[in-house]
Image (cartoon, rainbow, N blue to C red):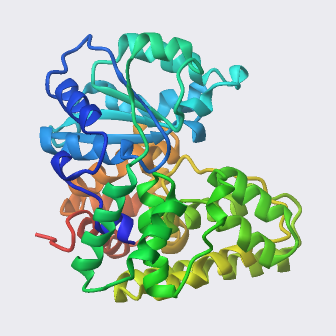
Amino acid sequence: MWTEKYRPKEVGYMVGNEDVRARFYSWLKHWVPGSKPALLLGPPGTGKTTLVHAAAEELGYDVMELNASDYRTKTVLERRLRPAMGGLTVFGSKILVFLDEVDGLYGRADYGGAEYVLKLISSITVPLVMAANREDVGHMPGMERASLVMKFKRIPSRLMELYLRYILKSEGRALDREVILNIVKYASGDMRAAINGLQAIIYGGGFEGGYRDVRMTLRDAVTEAASNGLADEAYAILRTVDAQPQEKIRAVYATLTMGTQRMDPAKFARSMRLLSEADILYSRIIKTRNWKLLRYLDRILAASLAGTHAVYSEYDTPYNISSRIWNEGKVLRKTAKVMSKAFHVSRKEFMTYYFDTFVLFSAKNGGLILRLGQLTGESDKSIRKVLNEEHKRLLGGNNR
């Protein structure tokens, strides 16, 4: 996706909101324990997330990012944020906690998420950044009073045009200025929407210029698409979401496996088969860089959801881990079960917080692999194979 390919990796290469960028960079550079957290307010596509990651990279922080609207309860937020409380990763790098869509916590007082974040603000010992897709203040009075509020504005049209021209030049492509201006007008100050529109025209020959006027969250779009019995209408709904393909696949996977009750087995099997086709398609797109195929992804996802009446669900375990557990079978599941008991945590917690470190430690530890074989009832050869594959994944294929 061009939104990722051309996402600035340094603060100085970003477009628009120059004063806010300088203020945020200075805040993070001079952060000390006891400093107020940063609260970034502004419309989607104005650079809030990009700024956090770019500044963190430049100043030596690892970002622990959570979408607060997906983890609304005090219990879940506390569990997900626990690894950050030490201030350092297992490799000794500094941690920055980034809570996106914190406005999703309000209006849900029974969940306790907003109250937990307010308590966290007064006690956290690492930099805390929060973001909300709002242009106004006063919606979250407690957080606003306790934070350093930074307001993002929509990206000016002229800057958007220049950046789109830069992308076209980098790709060796060209478009009439009238077409570029139409994309800019359609995006209405949202750089991510503008880049998505540009890529849609280059690879697909056009884009639905009016669909963005009806914005939906991923949560609402998945739920509404699932309740619609017509695949074409479910497709139109999914097209209203500015989300990355893998985010959509992850959301549909969690929703189908956790948000359905008493679904006909044959219908469930069909939905999961279509979802697997979407996952394979996306992998092929990434491998071949054939972005034209993206036009089919939402259609396949819509077909997998339509008529299931599933309710949006989200796994605590990250999708890339849960999908490996699903696909790699009993050896990994048995290993996770044994080790979660050894660490006195749930299997989900072990896979989320401990698994990667465990792999790095154990992949070359013959004695531990032998003992795992005894405890799981699997051959040490099978366990060694799985751990070696995970070791390669962590080190990017370098298994020294």
- Classify residue 262 as left or right of residue 111: right
- Classify residue 71 as left or right of residue 300: left
Image quarter of the N terminus: bottom left
Toward the left, the furthest residue is 400
Relative vertical location of residue 168 with respect to residue 376 in this rendering, above or below: below
**Residue 250 pos. (x, y %):** 56, 62
Camera-side residue of 243 and 178: 178
Asked if residue 219 shows in the view, the reply is yes
Residue appearing at x 52%, y 38% in the figure: 133
**Would you identify the image quadrant in which residue 76 lies?**
top right
Image quarter of the C terminus: bottom left
**Residue 113 pos. (x, y %):** 59, 24
**Would you identify the image quadrant in which residue 399 lies?**
bottom left
**Residue 71 pos. (x, y %):** 57, 37
Toward the front, the furthest residue is 178
Asked if residue 333 shows in the view, the reply is no
Relative vertical location of residue 2 with respect to residue 221 in this rendering, above or below: below
**Residue 58 pos. (x, y %):** 14, 43
Residue appearing at x 39%, y 10% in the figure: 122
- Classify residue 234 as left or right of residue 325: right
